[in-house]
Image (cartoon, rainbow, N blue to C red):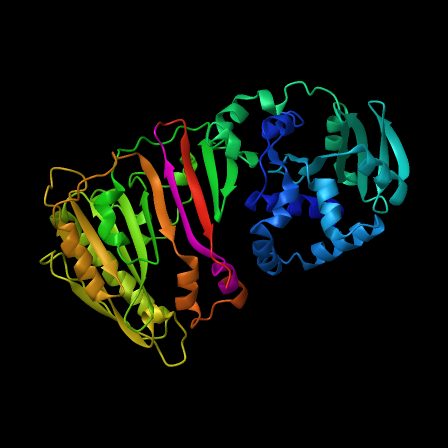
């Protein structure tokens, strides 16, 4: 793997923990052209080795299969007569900009600009095997890594700027070399996108920034800032697609509190049921995008609401259970087509797991009665413990105590019948008082990865994945679409206490 990719991956990893400097991101943004397709800016990366991120990176590296990258970095540092940590501090410890062009085509190109002191720049020239290649805008282009990379340097304020990129990406390198060390015309720091992104978090806390231009037909861009404090890392992100987002109604996550109680993980999302493909409108893919009713039949489409939810819990046996819910416009009209859908679903699950076919259509009879369907597997067919050798799937419907409001009712289903009944009963009660006003949320959720790992350790789950999950005690997110032109939200994670 090339040194550029090593630099890029290690730079991106700094997103987990960096030290802020006043005006730092503004200064780094001034190094990048506004028309780039990808921009990752990092300020003050050297402190990442002294924070909680180092333990995270040590555990994540095997999962990312960066063993060869780490080895190559050690070899590169040795060529400079430095330790790997010293090489990181010297070469990536100040201000770094990763820039990409044409990323949605086969001609994608990447380059990295990093700010170093002049002693470091001189050390590179004297210790690395370097061969002159050409001149671009009066600057010498040097070949390194046996010609695989090009290195260009220029004086900048108190130090030097290094521009590094693969030789095959010469067009991007030549473009960036023209203004290296000089004022960049139409710099990213002057763009409306940068100004909007930097508003997403307190400036004194922002440690890194990313920007990605979206391909057609969605178009537009997504970007955000990253900041860390103590054991918490937060990403504030914004999406501004060219294609208008569908208008959604405000709703309160507190109305769905029964789904969250005792959950190891939960997600609440809006997916307008009249959209064949929400992604065409720039909507995020969504945690619940694979739910059956998100690709509704003509019979289901008129009766489904826009709100969907799912939660994972642990039952008395210590096994994982799943419960889902979707809003419906009218319980009596929704029951029959949903019963038909569930009859097909249970039959398909049984056949796929080697069991006997089962098909019983309840036909919408007594919607508030709880339906039970057997789930069976042939001997030797593996499945998650939520359906072991046998089990059942349950579902029911509940009318809202205030059917004139949205949602008018709910369809609740899951692998633990008693939880399905408990949630259905809670939905039928008066909605709780709202501690905060409703919002136009696209998605909101949270999970406890370390607790999930404890439950999943009996399953056929990769030990590396479980080890990664144990690193985080909590993750969460929310995404709002207050208008048809922009969605914004936050993703946060809390590092687990070391054991």
How many numbered marks does the figure carry?
0
Which residue is at a point 32% across and 44% down the rendered structure image?
Answer: 269
Q: Residue at x 61, y 34 (%)?
A: 39
Residue 34's place in the image compared with 462, above or below, is above
Q: Is residue 356 visible?
A: no
- Residue 317 lies, in percent from the top left, at 30, 73
Between 271 and 349, the one lying in front of the other is 271
**Above or below — where is 179 with respect to 21?**
above
The answer to whether 271 appears left or right of 4 in the picture is: left
Give the percent coordinates (x, y) of residue 245.
Answer: 38, 31
Instruction: Report the residue that reaches farthest toward the bottom.
Output: 379
Frontmost residue, 33 versus 477: 477
Left or right position of 256 against 147: left
Question: In the visual, does 81 lie left or right of 463?
Answer: right
User: Which residues are drawn in magenta?
Assistant: 466-482
For residue 185, side relative to residue 205 (left or right) = right
Question: Where is residue 426 drawn, in percent x and y?
Answer: 16, 53
Residue 90 visible in the shown view: yes
Q: Nearer the viewer, residue 336 or 278?
A: 278
Magenta run includes residue 473:
yes
Give the image quarter of residue 156: top right
Please say whether residue 391 is one of the residues in the magenta stretch: no
Residue ID at (29%, 41%): 273
What x and y, as percent, mark residue 131?
90, 39
């Amino acid at each position: 793997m090339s040194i550029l990719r090593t630099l890029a991956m290690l730079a991106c990893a700094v997103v987990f923990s960096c030290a802020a400097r006043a005006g730092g991101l503004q200064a780094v943004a001034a190094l990048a052209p506004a028309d780039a397709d990808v921009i990752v800016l990092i300020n003050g990366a050297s402190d990442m080795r002294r924070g909680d991120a180092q333990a995270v990176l040590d555990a994540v590296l095997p999962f990312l299969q960066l063993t060869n990258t780490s080895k190559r970095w050690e070899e590169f540092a040795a060529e400079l007569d430095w330790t790997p940590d010293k090489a990181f501090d010297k070469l990536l410890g100040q201000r770094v900009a990763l820039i990409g062009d044409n990323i949605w085509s086969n001609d994608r190109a990447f380059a990295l600009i990093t700010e170093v002191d002049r002693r470091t720049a001189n050390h590179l020239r004297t210790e690395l095997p370097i061969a002159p290649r050409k001149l671009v805008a009066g600057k010498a282009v040097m070949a390194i890594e046996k010609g695989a990379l090009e290195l260009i340097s220029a004086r900048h304020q108190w130090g030097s700027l290094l521009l590094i990129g693969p030789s095959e990406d010469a067009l991007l390198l030549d473009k960036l070399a023209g203004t290296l060390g000089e004022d960049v015309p139409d710099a990213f720091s002057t763009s409306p996108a940068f100004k909007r992104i930097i508003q997403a978090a307190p400036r004194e806390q922002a440690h890194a920034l990313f920007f990605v231009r979206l391909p057609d037909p969605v178009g537009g861009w997504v970007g955000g800032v990253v900041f860390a404090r103590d054991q918490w890392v937060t990403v504030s992100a914004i999406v501004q697609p060219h294609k208008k987002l569908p208008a959604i109604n405000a709703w309160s996550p507190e109305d769905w509190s029964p789904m969250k109680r005792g959950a190891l993980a939960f997600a609440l999302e809006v997916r307008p049921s009249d959209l064949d493909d929400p992604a065409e409108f720039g909507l995020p893919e969504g945690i619940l995008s694979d739910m059956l009713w998100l690709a509704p039949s003509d019979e289901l489409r008129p009766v489904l609401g826009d709100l969907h939810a799912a939660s994972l819990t642990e039952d008395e046996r210590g096994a994982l259970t799943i419960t889902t819910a979707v809003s419906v416009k009218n319980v009596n009209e929704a029951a029959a087509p949903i019963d038909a859908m569930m009859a097909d679903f249970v039959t398909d699950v049984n056949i796929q797991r080697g069991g006997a076919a089962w098909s019983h259509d309840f036909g919408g009879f007594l919607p508030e009665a709880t339906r039970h369907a057997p789930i069976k597997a042939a001997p030797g067919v593996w499945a998650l413990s939520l359906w072991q050798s046998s089990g059942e799937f349950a579902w029911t419907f509940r009318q809202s105590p205030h059917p004139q409001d949205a949602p008018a009712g709910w369809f609740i289903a899951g692998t633990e019948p008693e939880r399905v009944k408990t949630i259905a009963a809670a939905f039928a009660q008066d909605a709780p008082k709202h501690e905060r006003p409703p919002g136009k949320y696209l998605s909101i959720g949270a999970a406890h990865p370390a607790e999930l790992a404890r439950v999943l350790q009996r399953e056929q789950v990769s030990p590396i994945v479980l080890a990664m999950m144990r690193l985080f005690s909590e993750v969460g997110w929310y995404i709002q679409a207050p208008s048809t032109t922009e969605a914004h939200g936050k993703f946060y994670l809390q590092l687990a206490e070391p054991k």
